[in-house]
Image (cartoon, helix red, strand yellow):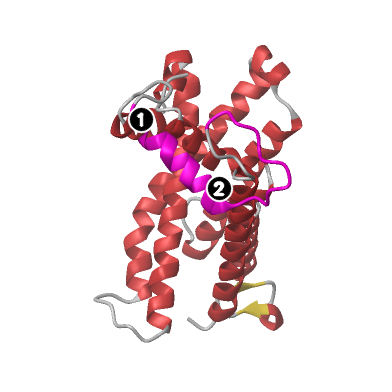
Amino acid sequence: MAYFSGLSDALRITFVQIMIISTIAIVVFLYGMILNFQKWGAGVTGYGLEPQVGTKGSAIRFFKTWWNQVTEESHHHGKPILEVLILDIVFQRRILKRSPLRWFMHFTIVAGWMTLFALSGLMFAVEMTEKIGIELPFTPAEFRDMLSLPNYIFGYILLIGVLIAIVRRLFISEVREASIMYDWSFIGIVFLVTVSGFVADGIRTGIIWNFGLDPASAPPAALFHSIISLLFCIAYIPYSKYIHIIATPLAILANKGGE
């Protein structure tokens, strides 16, 4: 592959360069997560206790405290860990009890987003493995083709969830009145990332989402999708309210399920 994407022939980004950018985004994400873990573990040695004055935050302390709460037999709601993991975190039964439509919307967004994130991670790992000279039973191009169908499936799953969220906020008065700018920005960014991915692929392949655009515009479209995905779906998460997609499952596990 001579290049990954770019704005013009003179401004094309090589594959190695996009991998470096991806690595930077991951490092920024991990650094932000460490900062959050340090903040959450700022001197807290037990559930419900205030941080110790003057004590520097410790990610290790946070994980020790969190793990003690998770493994404590009679803590909070006391649901089995496997039940909490499958029913409360993966299938989000607490939301289902409140509203089946809201549950379907939330589940499709989370399932689509997280699965596409995982697939991108797999593609990244295969590409890096090939670059360092380790032989695999398939080439990166063959692996990309293998991921094409699941990428389409979970892309549409994500798109369905986002469209439901937009419709609810536009046409259901109580949802619209309760929505704040954060809610709109979150949905807007996810919608933009999802659609830009379909458009970039559609221009490249000439199917469904190409909108009759010149195939020469495929590299800029791919670059746009890649950059906003790296910025908002990876690097930005720990520094924004999007952190709830990580913090909420941790809290549910610590509380052993329940409301």
Residue 4: where, in percent of width, then height? 55, 74
Residue found at the far left of this picture:
137
Which residue: 40% across, 20% down? 77
Which residue: 38% across, 46% down? 153
**Front residue of this view, candidates 157 and 42:** 42
> Do we see residue 27 in this rendering?
yes
Q: What's the magenta region?
A: 47-73
**Front residue of this view, candidates 46 and 161:** 46
Residue 15: where, in percent of width, then height? 54, 78
Question: Label 2 is placed on what type of residue?
Answer: Thr
Residue 200: where, in percent of width, then height? 56, 59
Residue found at the far bottom of this picture:
133
Q: Dot 1 surroundings within 10 Å: few (below 14), some, or many (20 or more)?
A: many
- Residue 141: image quadrant is bottom left
Which element type, helix, strand or loop, lies under badge 2?
A: helix
Question: Label 1 is placed on what type of residue?
Answer: Val
Horizontal side of residue 10 vs 43, given as left or right: right
Inspect the magenta stretch and tell me whether residue 89 lies in it: no
Q: Is residue 83 above or below residue 147?
A: above
Which residue: 47% across, 46% down? 64
Inspect the magenta stretch and tell me whether residue 52 lies in it: yes
Instruction: For marks 2 and 1, give the one nearer the viewer.
Output: 1
CA separation in Å, label 2 and label 1: 29 Å
Residue 173: where, in percent of width, then height? 68, 13
Which element type, helix, strand or loop, lies under badge 1?
A: helix
Q: Dot 2 surroundings within 10 Å: few (below 14), some, or many (20 or more)?
A: many
Residue underneath mark 1: 84
Q: Is residue 69 above or below residue 41?
A: above
Residue underneath mark 2: 194
